[in-house]
Image (cartoon, rainbow, N blue to C red):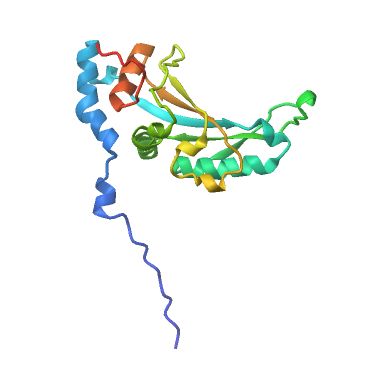
Amino acid sequence: MAKEKKTQVQAGPTVDQVNYVPSLKKKYKEEIVGKLMKEFSYSTVMQVPRLVKITINQGIGAGTQDRKLVDVAQQELSLIAGQKAVQTVSRKDISNFKLRRGMPIGVKVTLRATKMYEFLERLIAVSLPRIRDFKGISENFDGRGNYTLGIKEQIIFPEIDIDKIVKVMGMEITFVTTAKKDEEAYALLREFGLPFKNIKHN
């Protein structure tokens, strides 16, 4: 008698998972779009700037001497971002720094859609307030509607166990938007809740 093959049926996403919308994405659609249309007198919703992606980069100069630092940074950044980070490598040889082409020199991760909104919410609500003597973030736009935030220590993120860190390392978080002007990008990120110093309201 032939044995019947057992087939495993994988459960699909629940109704809650299918209908889940990050709170900041919901805020953008229900509140921010209307505010920015009024502030900048846009004629259509398509003109309202959007947040496209968030990239997080860590340059690890000491990684040329200790490869373990890059591996640890990759693990930590993956925890912080909620998505697997990748290692970045040198594109050329620099003998003065004992750097060879292809050598790991940092880590990065790019967040879009749900992961992006979830990270942004954690950054605003939890991580930035943990910075010592925090008084707001500086404006650092690039002239093309994108903003880069420098973080000095990865320990502000609750995903990092301070008792297990190998080395205190900083990072750069870049917010890429569809804004054509810095003032539009500033208004967009301000409405999301990024705590700029001396917030300007038009």
Above/below status of 168 relative to 15: above
Q: Residue at x 22, y 16 (%)?
A: 37
Q: Position of residue 192 (x, y in %)?
A: 30, 27
Q: Position of residue 161 (x, y in %)?
A: 50, 47
Q: Residue at x 72, y 34 (%)?
A: 64
Q: Position of residue 117 (x, y in %)?
A: 35, 35
Q: Is residue 22 left or right of residue 171?
A: left
Q: Residue at x 63, y 40 (%)?
A: 70
Above/below status of 84 relative to 1: above
Q: Nearer the viewer, residue 51 or 131?
A: 131
Image quadrant for the C terminus?
top left
Q: Nearer the viewer, residue 22 or 77?
A: 77
Q: Residue at x 24, y 46 (%)?
A: 19
Q: Position of residue 158 (x, y in %)?
A: 43, 43
Residue 187 visible to the viewer: yes
- Classify residue 116 by image quadrant: top left
Outermost residue, right side: 95
